Amino acid sequence: MPYSQTLYSVVEPVKKTTISRLNKSKKWKYGYNKEHDIVVISKTGQIGEILDIQGLKIALPKLPKKIHEHKSNKWVRFDYPKELAKLKNIFDWRAYPEESKEQWFDYIDEEFKRRDEGFWFTNNSQPTYITGTHYMYLQWSKIDVGAPDFREANRLFFIFWEACKADTRCYGMCYLKNRRSGFSFMSSAETVNLATISSDSRYGILSKSGADAKKMFTDKVVPISINYPFFFKPIQDGMDRPKSELAYRVPASKFTRRKITANETQEELVGLDTTIDWKNTGDNSYDGEKLSLLVHDESGKWEKPDNILNNWRVTKTCLRLGSRIIGKCMMGSTSNALDKGGNNFKKLYYDSDVTKRNRNGQTRSGLYSLFIPMEWNYEGFIDEYGRPVFDTPRRECYGPDGELIDVGVIDHWDNEADGLRDDQDALNEFYRQFPRTEEHAFRDETKNSIFNLVKIYEQIDYNEGVGNSAAVTVGNFQWVNGVKDTKVVFTPDNNGRFKISWVPDLRLQNNVIFKNGVKYPGNEHIGAFGCDSYDISGTVDGRGSNGSLHGLTKFSMEDAPPNHFFLEYISRPPTAEIFFEDVLMSCVFYGMPLLAENNKPRLLYYFKRRGYRGFSMNRPDKLWNKLSTAEREIGGIPNSSEDIKQAHAAAIEMYINDHVGHKGDGLYGNIYFNETLHDWSKFDINKRTKFDASISSGLAIMACNRHLYTPSAPKKKKNLNINIAKYTNTGFTSQIIK
């Protein structure tokens, strides 16, 4: 399976002449540039390369003429001057000899500049930029192993986060991560970094439980704050190692008669009045409070009754005043199984896609989603320059700790996965913890599935590898020149409702046969459609189930791939009539019949009124003379019968076992619709109405194999000859009397 060595790309959405012209006068402002649709994270007024990270275009600062270069040709943490290291707080600095202070002014000013603007250094002979937040993490943050290592994956993470902070349309990030990627420490470092330069602000922490939030606060946030140099450390109130709140404010002091009557003047101390705290996990945590930063750790692991979606709807309001966003959220997690909090996080993650915005320019959630594949950030496979070792090295390669790396991370990961093939729950947990794709990250447990999840997930992985975009085209069907009941054409459209992976030859398109004024499909021998319809255009809650349509081929002598799902439609247009017309045009274009559920009959009556009753298949499990009056009139199959439910599930199971996943010799199935595959993986025969794609795809399989369900005609009764022979008994032998 291919893997992504291009987590980002250098793009040119702005002409170089424009960049050069505005650079001269330092006109590039920090923040979102609407004219060029880029997010500028440079604070120098000049920009250089523009990176595209998961759809977000980010302009970096311009490369300076002089950058830091260590003799080792890589990132090395700067030594903290021993004299300054002795000073623990601002009071020690005030007591420091005045004549000795001046020598450190330039050093301290430079550290503040790096903290604000970021830092350039040479890494493996390449100029490399890190944000100010990343610099503070590498240079001044203490983690469990001491000083953090430089990693390219973390550099991209912090660049993306800086863009989230700079973009006024954004509430923050939703980071889908792999285990041990350092998110907890990086978000803790950012919390301390922002809190120690902000006044009158509040910073909050949530996790999958209150105990986890407290542990993050006491074991990560507080130690980072304690180990800051004195010139970054504000005056602090309370204990040095607090358990619930870290307060950067002036401690209260009692007035005494001696203080009031003292002649000496008291120097007024100034504090930030900024706090960092944590809350117990709950839907209403931080409700009604004003936050500058909310850290959401392990947000993909909130189990019932807690719900990350409900909490985000509440805490989102803590980060804004009216329409103005005044705070940010730093959310990151691996995903639990879907029924253990993973499904809510999955929805939140996909609602944060930066390529899908409303008219205010915001994503549905307000956050920006980021996924960094496992191979970019897997412990033990990062070289001394912080780069991932994808493939087995051809030359000696060493990690930051000097250990030899003699195998690539992909081979190592494949070996781990192969060892778990016989334990699908363990394999899925491994995929969720160390995902190479978003599909891996949101895998579900296998124990509740009635279908073969091994094959389903093999197919999903294969689809991700070959690239779904290459196999599937998105678009819409429409009548030629808008004239109904003529010919149908397919038009590609990225916002279309249809996904197709095969189109018949021109001679087979729009193959409609007329019989006695009724239209019939001319390609019935090639394949058929299955449909899960709906009758009501709108619902009270504005949601409702989707209409679903699937097209499937069967073996034929035509030039068509056999047993191939070639069309997927899962959508709910504004009106039911639009859906009906979409289904009708699909049937006409492919010239194939339709098997639909008749408990929602409006679609089938729509076909009949338009003269397409011949396209609506009758239920295959009954002979014509056994059909009800309504079934003879419009066709279709009911969904209430237990026999039909079992036959429907068995049809999907048969197809999965025969045509999905790895088939040997490097061959895989050719169903490229992952949404359908995921629907199969979650299918519950006792709650069928929730699985639109499973219903329609199963009906398509039944339609293409209807001979399996056709009852045999009753045998005609034969008239029995009950004549009794009579004999004569005269003579030596008896004879039959005729």
Image (cartoon, rainbow, N blue to C red):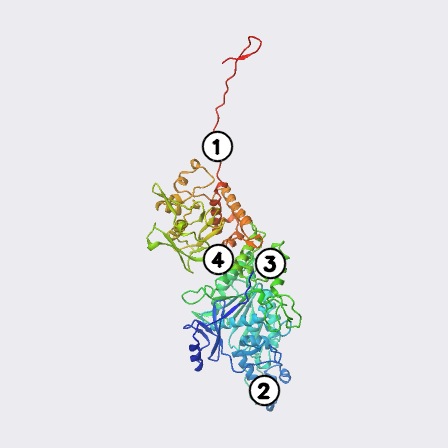
Q: Amino acid at mark 3?
A: Glu
Which image quadrant for residue 248? bottom right
Closest to the observer, 154 or 107 = 154
Which labelled disc corresponds to residue 104?
2
**In the rendered structure, which disc, 1 or 2, sits on the residue that comes first in sequence?**
2
State the residue position of label 3: 429
Q: Residues within 10 Å of mark 2 (few under 14, many from 20)?
A: few
Which part of the image, by quadrant, shows the N terminus? bottom right
State the residue position of label 4: 471
Q: Closer to the observer: label 1 or label 2?
A: 1
Q: Amino acid at mark 4?
A: Ala
Q: Is residue 290 visible?
A: no
Question: SS at mark 4?
Answer: helix
Q: Closer to the observer: label 3 or label 1?
A: 1
**In the rendered structure, which disc, 3 or 1, sits on the residue that comes first in sequence?**
3
Q: Closer to the observer: label 2 or label 3?
A: 3
